[in-house]
Amino acid sequence: MKKEHSAETLIEFPCHYQFKVVGAGGEQFRNAVVAAVERSLPVSADAVKVKPSKTGSYQSVSVVVTVHNYDQLKSIYADLRLVDGVQMLL
C-alpha cells in the first residue's frame, strides 16, 4: 500500500516556519507581506528579512513565525497569494 505524504503529515506542529515571498521592490510590498502573515499570527520586527535584487526591481521577503497547525499554515499561504506583486511564494 502506498503511503501518502503531505505537509499536514510531514510537518510537526507547532514549528518555526519561514515564508519567503519574492515580488516587487519597495517598502509597500514588504508591508503587505507582513500584514498578510499578521492576519493569522503576530510578527516581530526581527522575524522579517528583506533581500533586494541587484537592480532593486524585486525583493525577497522572509518572515519566520511559529505556526501551530496545518490550517493556520494554509491560511497564511492563501493570504500571501493575494498580495499584489507576488512573483513567487516559497
Image: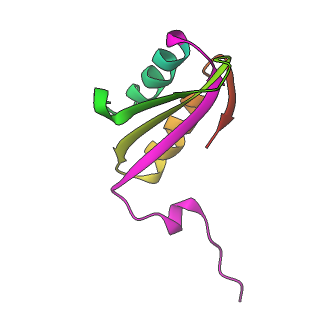
Where does residue 79 sit, x and y in percent of width and height? 55, 28
The residue stretch that appears in magenta: 1-28
The mark tally for this picture is 0
Task: Relative to 89, say whether 26 is above or below.
Answer: above
> 84 or 23: nearer the eye?
23
Q: Which quadrant, please, contains the N terminus?
A: bottom right
> 76 or 62: nearer the eye?
62
> Which residue corresponds to the image point at 33% horizontal and 56% vertical from the top-left?
14
Q: Which quadrant, please, contains the C terminus?
A: top right
Where does residue 87 sit, x and y in percent of width and height? 71, 28
Task: Relative to 15, say whether 50 is above or below.
Answer: above
Inspect the magenta stretch and tell me whether residue 4 lies in it: yes
Q: Residue furthest front?
A: 54
Task: Relative to 59, say whether 78 is above or below.
Answer: below
Q: Residue furthest bottom?
A: 1
> Which residue corresponds to the image point at 36% horizontal and 42% vertical from the top-left?
65
Inspect the magenta stretch and tell me whether residue 70 lies in it: no
Where does residue 60 sit, x and y in percent of width and height? 57, 31
Viewed as shown, does residue 21 lie left or right of 14? right
* Scheme of colours in the image: rainbow
> Which residue corresponds to the image point at 52% horizontal and 61% vertical from the top-left?
8
> Which residue corresponds to the image point at 42% horizontal and 49% vertical from the top-left?
17
Where does residue 68 sit, x and y in percent of width and height? 34, 50
In which image quadrant can residue 7 be found? bottom right
